[in-house]
Image (cartoon, rainbow, N blue to C red):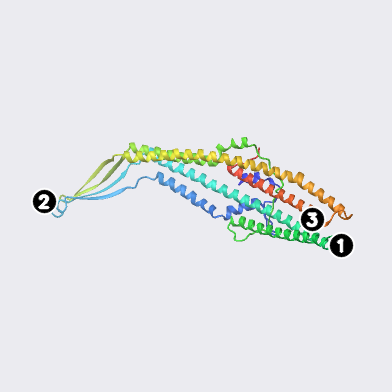
């Protein structure tokens, strides 16, 4: 979660707690709610208990065996009935050698490590998804505000055009054009409202809320943190948690292979001890013994070969994933640069130019040099430029989150 907070500097000046009055939501609030409410995070305790159970099972000693043997019973002659019965009650257990027990523990530990890394990877995925949905909400709020403002301006322009038509200054065509622009602006505002509601529901669903339990998502999309160069970022891919997970899986398979090879060269040594009662003399005696089960070499070697093949496949899968991530990182870095260019162009060129155009129209409108139609056209250009800046900023932040999810670290230089 920390890397997301660092990446989105838009949170720097915002409070970390939601206001009870207006239910304002920050990114930190959203991530905390996902941690508390998403069903996946309820598996945290189960994962810990599962790992502990595996470790205990790996180091558990073999169970003892109790047996009762009856000899010289139900025969004929001297052995008829139970006259010569010999009954032996015996306890036996396999010897659990320390190196084999250590090898089993190593297998369990390697598997637990790999599964813990997989769990953490899923956790980061949910954090990244929550951050992207949060950004969509903030962008949708800004777009709704802009479209409503433009709809209000279109309504004023339509009223002014009607007034000019009554004074024979504007034509019926100008009135129709203004009314068409107003209808289009209102439809655009309604669509923006629908997109915002969908974005709010999508975000709230991550912590299990059936309806949004916040009013406003607070952030500033205008601040675009600088990202490092592609060459710098690609050098960090080898040390990502995703690659660490593949390495842990390879260690697990390697531990399985080493255990199987030990078992292929060693059989099972068992000891036994007990009491024997002889019916004919009514006496008891102590019995003891040692047994040795020959190693199942073929089965153990097959298990070792399977583990080795699985390890080799895991190593290849890790290298394949690294190649795919490199391609993805390059595409994301290109998108990041394009989003910054689009944002800066809208901020530095499109919006100032549209404002200058609108100011010139407003100044000349009273003198009769321009009509409300010209004013509406200039306002539409300014509205379009503002929306492009909002969309580019949202795309930049969402792309930055994706990059930092791949790296599991800030993408700053």
Task: Please state which of residues 335 and 86 is positioned toward the viewer in this rendering.
Answer: 335
- In the rendered image of this protein, does residue 109 appear above or below residue 219? above
- In the rendered image of this protein, does residue 406 appear above or below residue 368? above
Q: Nearer the viewer, mark 2 or mark 1?
A: 1
Quadrant placement of the C terminus: top right
Task: Please state which of residues 181 and 318 is positioned toward the viewer in this rendering.
Answer: 181
Residue 245 visible in rendering? yes
Residue 146 on image: x %, y %: 74, 55
Q: Determine which quarter of the picture holds residue 312.
A: top left
Q: CA distance from mark 2 to mark 1?
A: 138 Å
Look at 62% across and 37% down and name the residue there: 230
Residue located beneath label 2 in the image: 78
Q: Earlier in the sequence, mark 2 or mark 1?
A: 2
Q: Earlier in the sequence, mark 1 or mark 3?
A: 1
Q: Is residue 354 left or right of residue 68?
A: right
What element does badge 2 sit on?
Answer: helix
Residue located beneath label 1 in the image: 168
What element does badge 3 sit on?
Answer: helix
């Amino acid at each position: 979660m920390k890397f997301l907070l660092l990446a989105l500097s838009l949170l720097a000046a915002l409070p970390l707690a939601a206001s009870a009055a207006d239910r304002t939501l920050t990114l930190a609030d959203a991530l905390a709610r996902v941690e508390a409410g998403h069903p996946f995070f309820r598996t945290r305790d189960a994962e810990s208990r599962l790992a502990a159970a595996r470790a205990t099972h790996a180091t558990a000693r073999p169970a003892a065996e109790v047996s009762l043997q009856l000899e010289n019973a139900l025969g004929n002659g001297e052995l008829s009935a139970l006259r010569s019965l010999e009954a032996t009650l015996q306890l036996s257990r396999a010897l659990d050698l320390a190196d084999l027990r250590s090898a089993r523990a190593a297998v369990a530990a390697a598997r637990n490590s790999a599964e813990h890394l997989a769990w953490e990877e899923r956790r980061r995925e949910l954090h990244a998804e929550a951050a992207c949905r949060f950004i969509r909400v903030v962008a949708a709020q800004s777009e709704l505000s802009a479209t409503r403002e433009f709809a209000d301006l279109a309504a004023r322009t339509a009223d002014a055009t009607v007034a000019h038509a009554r004074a024979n200054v504007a034509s019926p065509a100008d009135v129709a054009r203004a009314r068409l622009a107003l209808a289009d602006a209102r439809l655009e505002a309604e669509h923006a409202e629908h997109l915002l509601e969908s974005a709010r529901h999508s975000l709230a669903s991550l912590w299990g809320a059936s309806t949004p339990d916040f009013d406003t998502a607070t952030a500033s999309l205008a601040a675009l943190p600088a990202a490092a160069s592609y060459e710098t970022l690609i050098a960090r891919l080898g040390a990502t948690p995703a690659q660490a997970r593949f390495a842990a899986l390879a260690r697990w398979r390697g531990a399985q292979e080493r255990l199987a090879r030990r078992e292929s060269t060693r059989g099972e040594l068992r000891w036994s001890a007990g009491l024997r009662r002889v019916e004919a003399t009514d006496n008891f005696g102590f019995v003891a013994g040692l047994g040795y089960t020959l190693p199942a070499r073929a089965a153990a070697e097959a298990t070792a070969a399977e583990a080795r093949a699985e390890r080799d496949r895991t190593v290849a899968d890790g290298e394949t994933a690294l190649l795919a991530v490199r391609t993805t990182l390059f595409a994301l870095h290109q998108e990041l640069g394009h989003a910054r260019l689009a944002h800066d162009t809208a901020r530095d060129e499109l919006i100032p130019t549209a404002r200058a155009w609108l100011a010139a129209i407003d100044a000349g409108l009273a003198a009769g040099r321009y009509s409300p139609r010209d004013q509406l056209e200039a306002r539409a250009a300014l509205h379009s430029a503002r929306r492009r800046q909002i969309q580019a900023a949202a795309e930049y932040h969402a792309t930055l989150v994706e990059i930092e999810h791949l790296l599991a670290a800030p993408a700053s230089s």
